[in-house]
Image (cartoon, rainbow, N blue to C red):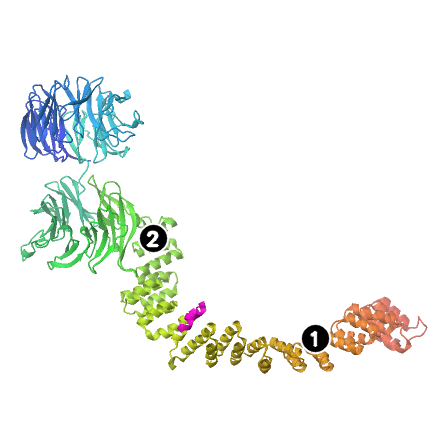
Amino acid sequence: MKRVFSLTEKSLLGFPIQYVWQKALGNYIAVTGASHTVKIYDRHGQRKDEIQLSGACYAMDWDKDGNALAIIADKSSSIYLWDPNTMKTSMLDSGMRDQMSFLLWSKAGALLAVGTSKGSLLVYNLQTSRKIPVLGKHTRRITCGCWSSQNLLALGSEDKMITVSNQEGDTIRQTAVRLEPSDIQFSVMKTDERASPGESTISVVVGKKTLFLFNLNDPDNPIELAFQQRYGSIVTHRWYGDGYIMIGFSLGFFVVISTHMREIGQELFQAHNHNDNLTSIAISQSLNKAASCGDNCIKIHDLAELKDMYAIINLDDETKGLDRLSWTDDGQLLAVSTQRGSLSVFLTRLPVLGDTCGTKIAYLTSLLDVTVVNHVEGEVPITVSVEVEPNFLAVGPYHLAVGMNNRAWFYGLSENGVDKLKDMEYLGSVASMSLNSDYAAALFEGKVQLHMIESDGLDQEERETRLFPKTDDTYRILCHALTGDFLIYGTNTGLIKYFYLEDWQFVNEYRHNVSVKKIFPDASGTRLVLIDEKADGFVYCSMNHNLYEIPNFSPTIKGILWENWPVDKGVFCAYDEDKIYTYVFHKDTIQGSKVILAGGTKLPFSHNPVLLHNGELTCQTQSGILSNIYLTTHSFISSLTDAAPSDLKKMLTQTLMLRRFSDAWEVCKLLDDQASWNELARACLHHMDVEFAIRVYRTIGNVGMVMSLEQIKGIEDHNLLAGHLAMFSSDFNLAQDLYLASSSPVSALEMRRDLQHWDSALQLAKRLAPNQISFISKEYAMQLEFTGDYVNALAHYEKGITGDNKFQEHDETCLAGVARMSIRMGDIRRGVNQALKHPSRLLKKDCAAILESMKQFSEAAQLYEKGQYYDKAASVYIRCKNWAKVGELLPNVSSPKIHLQYAKAKEADGRYKEAVIAYENARDWDNVIRIYLDHLNNPEKAVGIVKETQSLEGAKMVARFFLRLGDYGSAIQFLVLSKCNDEAFQLAQQHNQMEIYADVISSENTSNEDYQSIALYFEGEKKYFQAGKFFLLCGQHARALKHFLKCSNTEEDMAIEMAIETVGQAKEQLLTNQLIDYLMGESDGMPKVLFLKFTYHF
């Protein structure tokens, strides 16, 4: 902490001193030491006055407003009263014969209490000059006392009594204590019940050992608190907060206790702040800080968190130790006296006074020092020592202005240093001031004075100065700002006026509906944020006179800062005591200009934002230094490469809200997923950055979007371009509005047609293109027909008919629709007639299908027939039993099913010849065969068909037919043909037709079992040759050979040949030998003629 000044005058040194700050204002400090003099210093250490006393000073105190300093001294019965306004001292005769020992001003009124060494009391009213002497209030010296906020006076005396008196001096309470009281204070004790109004508890240190608590509402139950001996004796105590007491002890400890009955006696906090001793503690309610001094250092704690050490001030040259601490009421200055008699004053809180111009910041670094810095440009800081402690300052590109009340001093800032230019007096106390490169504008008492800072005296007289408003204007100016080109101000009537400095005239005016309290223009002045008397915030654009409401605008907002980073032109932040809100003004979006809230950042305690640059907020603190905070909405600037994917997603959202597409591109490269690229692309479309959108879509390979955007990127009509982009973003209603406001409103109609939004398209066509209504009606009707809304579909088909030969195909489509819809609506005659007249075959088919579903078969069949859909026509004629029409259509019918239905109908009517032709057309051969056999008695035809078609069922029918005729051979033949081998075998067996059966079956693919059955049959009939033949066919060679050798002489030659073939197939030696024996005649003694032939074969 900065030391403002030190007092080490010889007249003070050598003995502990007394001092007291002026109350309320804190502009003066009164100091006295061993000499009989009270010296008055201002807050910068300049001596202002000196009061000579008759003897040593016993006590001094300022009244509650700081308008009177009262002093009592040895060897004097008068009270010295010093007036800071006139710098004059007056003497007040107390009328007391005893030596005065105690003096204290009331904290609620102009009452002064004076006590004497004999225990008497005087109450003096400064306003009425009334004196009330009270003799014998105490029996011995009054040593301490305090006033309550209700003007009750508590006094402590060497007689070990405490009295409580009213402002008339009447005793209303008194109590005795065990030892001598000191450090008496009034406060409010913490209780469970609702406390009685006013300060009702007295705390007093008794014998420097205990703390005595005396409640005026409960005088019979005082509380006395003792503390650990290791703390030492009680030096002093202070009340703060909600019934808390901080107590300082001589051995360096300070302790905090609560006066709540449940917590009383408990130490809430204890710290050993000083090694050897503690001499004083002080509390500043305005700073919310507590300080203790001891040894040779001061330690300052934050009352909100006592464990945290706020600051430590070391006074290494004070070897004798420190004495007493005291803060000014505003907490700006902390004074400490020392054991050797010196006094040091430290700056603990500066007025937060600062201003910016671009990235240049001017701020108060000491009570009389202003520092100008520009960290962004890297300029060397300049410190300007000013003549007065300013209450306003302003900085421009080349100047600094500081001022107080109605006066301002101007300084020139250059590379060579600081030049004091001039000072000016205004017609009232200046509330705020703004500078640009040439002019200064000061706001005072509802007026603004605009004047040149440095006049060159050349043709500038009329521009030297001007006062706003003119005398005939009745409004009052509440706020103003000065940019490079404009003076802008807001008034109590809601006016915002732009005064153009170049032309020296007003160029713009906007009237708001309520008064304008604050304005914050950007660097160019074309946009400004205004806050009105309802605490609502708006962005005003002077280029188009539009006002945009700021969303979620807190009513506690204190100020606005525009972003100075050129890339983020529309970004600004609003701040209150504890939060910063980042907003973005999006000028060009498909939805028009608007303001969005991008996010919030916590503002540290007692930080005042002054500059925003690339997401970095520069703040002033009460200690006179600058501190930087990074907005959470700009976290992507510092931590992009190390961020996790979840954080990168948040950063992508941030960059898109801030419209920083280049940064968003880098984030998307790190995320490397399709969704992120698409999000970036959509944001580019929203903000109408077509070039960047093309770049993104090209990267992700969306060829269609690239081609579409390439086609529109040269469009200059803002609304038309925005309409296209809104359509690409699927916001079709917005796109329509934009198209209609553009130079090509018909684009809205084209879009609705492409989207098949026919209702909207028809509405648009009525206004924009009546010649398109017919075509849109047709399209709409087709959609309505598809969805089943036939009533409206019919109406729109009828609307769609143009009657123009140029659009014949279109009209035919509409007429077809009328036909279909008429039928669906029940107007069958109209629909059928329309369909019959229409050239389209397909329409006839569609209408016929609708009629068929409605069970209007005759009309359906008629349309099918007209449309040459003969199969369908015949099918429907069959359903309505119109066989005559079916017969007419049959030559053109290809469907076997219809022929079959017709055949059955004709058969049922007994018209078998027609039936058989129809069955043949249907290729139903079984029924053809059946009709030929059963009704037409034409077995030859039936047999021919069976042989041609190889129909099994037909073969069975023919077989049954021959069986009925007794032609068993033919019957067997057709049974075998129909694969009924068992039936054929039985028939052959029954009717001795096995030879026929054998002949037929040998020509078929017959199984060994069938051959074996025949062989066994012939074996039973002793027909050995036939038996041998079929045993050979079923592969039983031994049995076949046996039967061949049994044959009679008539069959012998053939039998021997078959025997030789059997042996050849069998390839068995035994059978070969058996045959050779037979041929050689060994079995019957008759050699066979064919021996040589056998030999040949063998």
Q: Is 886 or 997 nearer to us in this picture? A: 886
Q: Which residue is mark 2?
A: 653
Q: Quadrant of residue 279?
A: top left
Task: Verify whether residue 4 appears in magenta.
Answer: no
Q: Which residue is mark 1?
A: 951
Instruction: Give the crowd class for mark 2: few <14, some 14-19, many >=20 residues within 10 Å.
Output: many
Q: Is residue 1004 left or right of residue 89?
A: right
Q: Is 276 or 1082 nearer to us in this picture? A: 276
User: Where are the magenta residues, as a range?
Assistant: 783-796
Q: Is 291 or 410 nearer to us in this picture? A: 291
**Is disc 1 placed on a helix, strand or loop?**
loop
Residue depicted at 40% across the width and 77% down the height: 810
Instruction: Give the crowd class for mark 1: few <14, some 14-19, many >=20 residues within 10 Å.
Output: some
Task: Give percent across and percent down for residue 343.
Answer: 14, 29
Q: Is residue 679 left or right of residue 491?
A: right
Q: Is 915 or 892 nearer to us in this picture? A: 915
**Is disc 2 placed on a helix, strand or loop?**
helix
Q: Quadrant of residue 180?
A: top left
From the image, which quarter does the N terminus lie in? top left
Name the kind of residue labelled 1 in the image.
Ser
Q: Is residue 1054 left or right of residue 902?
A: right
Q: Is residue 919 above or below residue 58?
A: below
